[in-house]
Amino acid sequence: MTGIARKHVAGPRRANARAGALASIIVAAFMLMIVATGAGAIAGPIPASGPSDSDPPAEPQPAPFHKHRHLPTPAPTPMALPPEVKAKVPAYKPGPIPFHDGEQLIYQASWVGIPAAQARLEFHKPQKNPSRWTGEIWIETNPFADLFYKMRDYMRESMADDTLHTSGVYLVQHEKSRLNYYDVTIDRPAQMVTMTKKNHKGTQSKEFIASDPWGPISGAMMALTQNLEPGKTYAFDVFSGSQRYVFAFEVEKREKIHLAIGDFDAWRIVPDVWYVSDGLLRSQAHGTVLWISADERHLPLRIEAQAFIGYVRADLIKIDGKGGVESAQK
């Protein structure tokens, strides 16, 4: 099997593109778990297809120059949401927090049943500042998947325990030979968000105007605290390491699902993307379904997304604390 895998790695560019697309969907699956909805590329610049080492443009590219024509006006900085999109995004107040201090959730992603990656989410309150939550996530492909696409990603976010408002996001994106560091600074009083990307090429920054900004983890926690109802749609303005997304999810129905850790009563949720700041709407959300526990905790249980062949699935395989499993199974 190792020999076959290496042949694919050394194969034509099309095989590399497919491997990159698979890895992108795996990342999307885990990030969908985090946000409990569907942006697909919350962690960073994840292409819908093609080689994964090529980042999408930071801003829409200008049209080719033609004689007697003026170049288009650059996108304004800081950038604001289009009014028609902003009008559809409500403000939310948090309900009961779904996680416990020190709790860990472990997920495993597989492609057509073959294990490919694992993610660990941890939520805790720092001893020096117990009025805030810290959410962290580690994503790592397994040795077999490393042959196609090695991934070691990390994200951290700090949130106020009463409002879940975040001051920013820190992200390390280490995929194949690419290593990027992202800092997202969120200044709610000034309604300003600044994204800074650092790598061996230097430093890039972008600014955005936002009245109700969220990071991936804080947005997830806020979404999970809501009183979910069938037929209702929820939307959030989320800032990742590289892009701004307005994502939404519709609660379809309640149904039973089976995981390795037990049977669960769950909400079936269909995600959607309403806006992305680079102007290139992704396709990862299509064919994607999320299930969260239909209890007061709203634990993300499973995400399933269509791949170029078959599907990718990420399942909750462990909760640090027996009580968490028993509560979610009710």
Image (cartoon, helix red, strand yellow):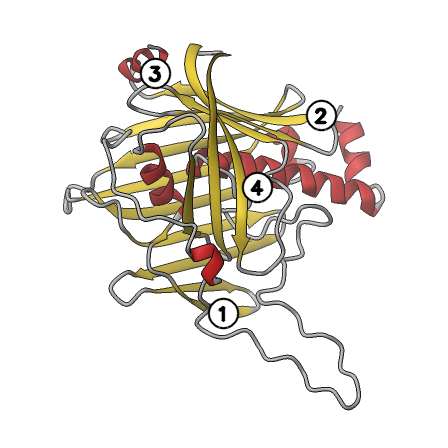
> What type is the residue that disc 1 sits on?
Thr
> What type is the residue that disc 2 sits on?
Gly
> What type is the residue that disc 4 sits on?
Met
Mark closest to the chain's N terminus, 2 or 1: 1
User: Which residue of the protein is positioned furthest toward the right in this rendering?
Assistant: 12
Mark closest to the chain's N terminus, 1 or 3: 1
Disc 1: which residue: 203
> What type is the residue that disc 3 sits on?
Ala
Residue 295 visible: yes
Q: Nearer the viewer, mark 1 or mark 3?
A: 3
- Location of residue 324 with respect to 208 vertically, above or below: above
Residue at position x 31%, y 64% from top? 191
Question: How many angstroms separate mark 1 from mark 3 (CA)?
Answer: 44 Å
Disc 4: which residue: 151
Disc 2: which residue: 310
Q: Residues within 10 Å of mark 1 (few under 14, many from 20)?
A: few
Disc 3: which residue: 328
Mark closest to the chain's N terminus, 4 or 3: 4
Find residue 320 and report its image quarter: top left
Question: How many angstroms separate mark 2 from mark 1 (CA)?
Answer: 38 Å
Residue in front for this viewpoint, 15 or 87: 87
Question: How many angstroms separate mark 3 from mark 2 (CA)?
Answer: 29 Å
Provide the secondary structure element on which disc 2 rests: loop
Question: How many angstroms separate mark 2 from mark 4 (CA)?
Answer: 21 Å
Mark closest to the chain's N terminus, 3 or 2: 2
Provide the secondary structure element on which disc 4 rests: strand
Residue at position x 47%, y 55% from top? 85
